[in-house]
Amino acid sequence: MAHFYFDFRDVDKQRLHNLLPSLLCHLSAQSDSFCDILSRLYSANDRGAQKPSDRAMIECLKEMLTFEAQQPTYIILDALDECPITSSIPSQSPRDELLEFVGKLVNLRSPNLHICVTSRLEHDIQAALEHLTPHPVTLHNESGQQQDIANYVTSFVHSNERMRRWPEADKDLVIKVLLENADGM
């Protein structure tokens, strides 16, 4: 299993060139064969003196994911919507680049590869991913999700040292406003 969390507060956690080394390291730590594959990439890049290109890292990852004796592999990409839609580079936004990468992984058609991408409902992400899977799952506006958010917010407001001293009406207002504007988050 390999996972990566995209974070809007951390530019390094919003780009393909930072996702790739993370996935490669996660996977190589779990398999001697994968470690050997990564070691070849390391050697080909002057034993780490040069950073490999995205293309080279993608090829390394593809080799791992299509390895003949590969066990089931799960890749979890969490919060893809936190990647920017715009870029200073005119060719492609970071989000477009990541969506294209996910498409490449799906197109490997590896029976042992399982991919989970989480995101808020955003049109560009839905449009890019809808044709990649026969089994999309959405939790947006699910009652269980809303109840989990309500439970968390209520628990936090009632257990927070400062908020515990607030009048009940203020606590109730905070809970109400946060729940109305949570939008699944």
Image: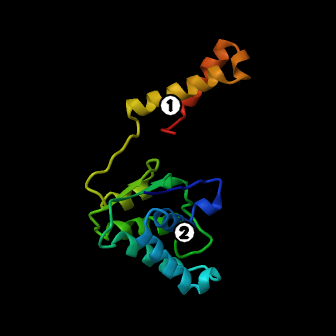
Q: Residue at x 74, y 23 (%)?
A: 162
Position of residue 26 in the picture relative to residue 141 (left or right): right
- Give the secondary structure at mark 1: helix
Q: Residue at x 70, y 21 (%)?
A: 163
Q: Position of residue 63 (x, y in %)?
A: 39, 76
| Picture colour scheme | rainbow
Q: Nearer the viewer, residue 108 or 35?
A: 35
Q: Position of residue 59 (x, y in %)?
A: 43, 78
| Most distant residue in the front direction | 32
Q: Tell me where residue 50 sits by quadrant.
A: bottom right
- Three-letter amino acid code of the residue under disc 2: Pro
Callout 2–callout 1 Cβ contact below 8 Å: no
Circle nearer the viewer, 2 or 1: 2
Residue of label 2? 21
| Number of numbered labels in the structure image | 2
Q: Residue at x 52, y 30 (%)?
A: 180
Residue of label 1? 149
Position of residue 19 in the picture relative to residue 104 (left or right): right
Q: CA distance from mark 2 to mark 1?
A: 33 Å
- Three-letter amino acid code of the residue under disc 1: Ile
Q: Nearer the viewer, residue 151 or 32?
A: 32
Q: Residue at x 28, y 68 (%)?
A: 109
Q: Is residue 3 above or below residue 52?
A: above
Q: Position of residue 13 (x, y in %)?
A: 59, 60
Q: Nearer the viewer, residue 149 or 89?
A: 149
Q: Residues within 10 Å of mark 2 (few under 14, many from 20)?
A: some
